[in-house]
Amino acid sequence: MFMSLMPPSRSERRRRDLLAAARQVVSDGGFRDLQMLAVAAAAGTAVGTIYRYYPTKAELCAALVGEVSARELEVIRSICEADGAPGQRLRDAVSAFARRALHNRRLAYAMIAEPVEAAVDDARLEWRRRIGEALAGLIAEGVARDAFRPVEPKLAAACVVGAFMEALVGPLSPATLLDDDDKLAADIAGLCLAIVEAPDPTEEDR
Amino acid sequence: MFMSLMPPSRSERRRRDLLAAARQVVSDGGFRDLQMLAVAAAAGTAVGTIYRYYPTKAELCAALVGEVSARELEVIRSICEADGAPGQRLRDAVSAFARRALHNRRLAYAMIAEPVEAAVDDARLEWRRRIGEALAGLIAEGVARDAFRPVEPKLAAACVVGAFMEALVGPLSPATLLDDDDKLAADIAGLCLAIVEAPDPTEEDR
Amino acid sequence: MFMSLMPPSRSERRRRDLLAAARQVVSDGGFRDLQMLAVAAAAGTAVGTIYRYYPTKAELCAALVGEVSARELEVIRSICEADGAPGQRLRDAVSAFARRALHNRRLAYAMIAEPVEAAVDDARLEWRRRIGEALAGLIAEGVARDAFRPVEPKLAAACVVGAFMEALVGPLSPATLLDDDDKLAADIAGLCLAIVEAPDPTEEDR
Amino acid sequence: MFMSLMPPSRSERRRRDLLAAARQVVSDGGFRDLQMLAVAAAAGTAVGTIYRYYPTKAELCAALVGEVSARELEVIRSICEADGAPGQRLRDAVSAFARRALHNRRLAYAMIAEPVEAAVDDARLEWRRRIGEALAGLIAEGVARDAFRPVEPKLAAACVVGAFMEALVGPLSPATLLDDDDKLAADIAGLCLAIVEAPDPTEEDR
DNA sequence: AATGAATGAGAATTCATTCAT
DNA sequence: AATGAATGAATTCTCATTCAT
């Protein structure tokens, strides 16, 4: 990580201030409220000024997400690249991310789960919640039967849902070409299983 | 699951056709393109007609997400509630979901990862991709050092990212009150670790 | 007034029922709510049926206003054409109208003062109310100084406002041609004055 | 009444111009034609511009009626509050209002008698006209018999109609609660009678 | 460089009217 | 004759973007 030794130029400062204003707006009301006028108001400048620094709303958005991303990414990266046992590092990275997100919940929510449209998203989040519920039932059962480790079923279920959904996002994206869908599906399932499975599965469970 | 034995009334058929048109639109261009005019065009009707069956765009959206959700949810539920070892059932549920998603990729993408705005989302997905990359590096290392099972690093990383992000969605949502952020973060991290950790961690890894 | 001695044909009955339904709708929610669908619902028929009897919403409206008008007009006419002192007849006619209106207030309001648009009309009625207030002040003063009869200022003011506004409606209507605006204005003013003036104006008032 | 000594700001001027455009539209075609697009066209601006100054069509309407109202109200008020005999002042106020209305007939018509819908109002105005006719007959008779002053029957009739209709508007409005409908009706009738009654009713008329 | 007023394409929604059954 | 689903023109309002000052 390099930091410029030069003081930021007036122009760089402007860009930052505008970005900070945008972040404020999103932190308060989500991406829904991210309108150029609102950002201008929050920055104490005029709309036109934003366009001098970010030629498009799209670029402002990208810069905003990019900035927040970069910070969080950096935290994760530095932990990942540290010394120590990989397991501990992974644990640390995830838990650092989670703690930080929980500290600035509104912004984190916007970054992670912000709705397309209220209508769509209410239904969409609800869907994931229900899939989670279904899995939580299964997981609770598995825990009871000692097939799974003593995990908290709801939380574990959310992890499973997130795991396979995210694992799909890349492959689902229009550009991706895949050779073997079935292999992929099986692999994803295997990884998800590991979230809960007992290290030493009992006879009964096999 | 009950299926009506009566043939669908004309009105029910219409509703379905309109929903099918909406699904088509979303399958082609995502929720971005879901405009009443576009749906009407896809259904070969007039805009006003849609409003006879869905009094609001919001309700049409909800119905669409609801329908797709219901189908997928049902698949997962029936597997979860079947007989057999919990582990196998979990594996089956996830892999069935994944296979189905991979079959109708565009729609699945819309349901799972559709952008708020192209601008926001490009950046947002990119962010998750990069976090994934960072973790993939760590995971590859862990695999090499036999601290982790021989997982495919990129895929496992995606699962980890998805797992903790999803596990955070509920807790991040504005309404949620939390007692202990640190405990939650640690629990999430523990579950994520399980995705990759070797059942019998070597000395070296500790 | 003739009443047909023949029983009404089915078709005539239909027309009446539809009109009754329309009146019901207006009595409940004013002309704002007079939509073809609402009338059909109130009549327990289909929209298309209304169009068999009233080829246009405009004609249905006209028929409705016409019917209500006709009844009230008849009451007034019969009193006007009765025997007795003109003064008493006028008194009776007006007071009969007023009493009837007060009995079916919602419908009467719709007939007399229904808004164009909430926005316009709130402002418009408010205007007339304020003019009334200004005049009420003057009238109260006149009453106190015995220049006017002991009328109730607010009510008298409303009468004056209504009197000149109505007297202007005809002349204002686009088709009307006028010779002498000033003469007309003076005449209207004279009539309005009569509403309150003492029969025998005191010296002071002249 | 204060007039600002400062020249109007650009923004104030804009607001005025837009209002003037709206007034023009109404003066030409009544409130029926008052659509945002039409106003924009009349003002030589884009629709969006109107929304910068009047956040809602309703507010534009209110402002328009308010502006016209205010001017006329002021004329009436200043006359009402002047010195002189109350009778003369009332006469002056009414006649000033009438003269002004007759000068800008289209706008005055829109302010005073504009239709809800052409359909409704044609019929509604027609109704009032007919009631006027009926009363005019009675008034003519009363004049002929010297029971009434030598008023112009049609004009006097219009005044009477306006007087009682207006006097009813307040009491009819949904919010109003009334103690004694009959007393109100009688009072209104009494005031209406005064419009025409001879100061010294002949025996015959009693 | 900054301003912020102006722009206008778009999108949702309403409702009188039509017409096939 | 009756039905009521379908139609689509019309209208309000939003907000990213431009540009004269």
Image (cartoon, coloured by chain):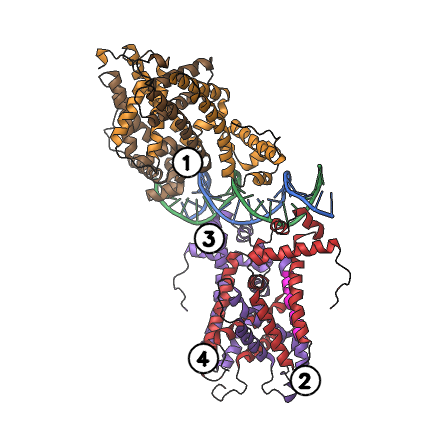
Chain colours: A red, B purple, C brown, D orange, E blue, F green
Quarter-of-image position of residue A175: bottom right
The amino acid type, in three-letter code, at marker 2 is Arg
* Subunit of label 2: B
Q: Is residue C102 magenta?
A: no
Q: Is residue B124 magenta?
A: yes
Alpha carbon separation for disc pair 2 and 1: 83 Å
Of circles 4 and 2, the one toward us is 2
Alpha carbon separation for disc pair 4 and 2: 34 Å
Q: Earlier in the sequence, mark 3 or mark 2?
A: 3
Label 1 Cα neighbours within 10 Å, binned few <14 / some 14-19 / many ≥20: some
In the rendered image, which residue does mark 4 sit on? A141
Q: Which mark is residue B59?
A: none
Task: State the residue at coordinates (49%, 24%).
Answer: D106
Task: State the residue at coordinates (45%, 29%).
Answer: D114
Highlighted magenta segment, given as a residue range: B121-135
In the rendered image, which residue does mark 2 sit on? B145
In the rendered image, which residue does mark 3 sit on? B54
Same-chain status of marks 3 and 2? yes
Q: Is residue A39 left or right of residue C190?
A: right
Alpha carbon separation for disc pair 4 and 3: 40 Å
Q: From the top left corner, tell me how far across and down residue D125 is, in percent.
A: 39, 26
* Subunit of label 1: C
**SS of the residue under disc 2:** loop
Same-chain status of marks 2 and 1? no
**SS of the residue under disc 1:** helix
C81 up-or-down from B140: above or below: above
In the rendered image, which residue does mark 1 sit on? C57
